[in-house]
Image (spheres, grey):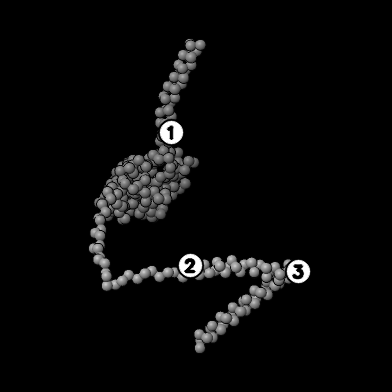
Amino acid sequence: MRQSNVMSKFTHLIIFSALLTALPAYAAKQEEIVEHKLLMDHGDGHLMDMDGAMVMGQNKDKLPPGCDKISGDEEITVRAGHKYSKKFPGTMFAFDKQEWRVKPCTRLTVHFINEDHIRHQWMMHGLPKYLYDKGMFHLEVTGPAKISGTLIMPKEDKTYLVHCDIAQHMEKGMKAQLVVGKGGGTFPSIPGLTDFAIPDNYGTAQASVATPAPPAIGPQSAQPSSAPQPSSNTGTFLIGVILGLFATPFLISNFRQRFQGMSSKDVVLYGANLGKSLFDQAVHLVSSLYRSLKK
């Protein structure tokens, strides 16, 4: 019996050790970055796969006007996720970098890695529309995953807006810029790079300043204080209650005698006639008051 208990405990220990060993491997597998390579070309630089990963504005060989040749090939890796927003108070998402710089006419390959378990984008705006549909270059994937795309930068010096266009992701921190050559200005509200258009205040709260008490006013003996006037509402209410208590039995007895022997139809007709009579009297009273005021 004792040997059986020892074997049972030993078996439980082995199973527990196996679980501890398997959990990290399972977690690592769950966080594995899936790379999307088998994309279908739908034309005009639009590529997609069956899992919803997409590239828009892919351009590997069409030179922009003014570029006699490709000045060079460059690659950048962009990581996106919630953890990159921790250094920017008030944000929820962010890229690992907020600015990239390349030379004009560069053929740029962007490797976009989304580390969150939601959908993110890396989208550029302001490109020539005759070369890039709607002036955009766009990478999009549901994470954890990686997708890559290539474009050729125009010749002019310019700063391009980069952001995630999914609802509220840019407003919550996923905003950056790509500078070509010397650039052409900056964009506001880029975390850690430019001033916010509407600044937030995350500093310590200022101590409230105590308001000095107004000076005490001495008693004015020349002006006697007036006693509060009693309200007439209480008396009116009491009179109404007393009249109601005394009048209710008489009204009940009167209506009982009046409706005795009458059918329900007769009671309805009587009520209608009484209502009409009261309405006529009210109209007559209002018209009389109006004529007296008009005079």
Q: Quadrant of residue 261?
A: bottom right
Q: CA distance from mark 1 to mark 2?
A: 76 Å
Binning the other alpha carbons within 10 Å of mark 3 as few (below 14), some (14 to 19) or many (20 upward) gives: few
Amino acid under disc 3: Gly
- x, y percent for residue 28: 40, 31
Which mark is drawn over residue 18? none
Amino acid under disc 1: Gln
Asked if disc 2 and disc 3 are in contact, CB closer than 8 Å, the reply is no
Binning the other alpha carbons within 10 Å of mark 2 as few (below 14), some (14 to 19) or many (20 upward) gives: few
Of badges 1 and 3, the one in the foreground is 3
Label 2 belongs to which residue?
234
Q: In the picture shown, does residue 85 fall above or below 126?
A: above
The residue positioned 70% from the left and 68% from the top of the image is 256
Of badges 2 and 3, the one in the foreground is 2
Q: 39 left or right of 243? A: left
The residue positioned 62% from the left and 79% from the top of the image is 280
One can see residue 171 in this view? yes
Q: CA distance from mark 2 to mark 3?
A: 42 Å
- x, y percent for residue 294: 51, 86
Label 1 belongs to which residue?
30
Label 3 belongs to which residue?
261
Q: Quick one: SS at disc 1?
A: helix
Q: In the picture shown, does residue 148 fall above or below 258?
A: above
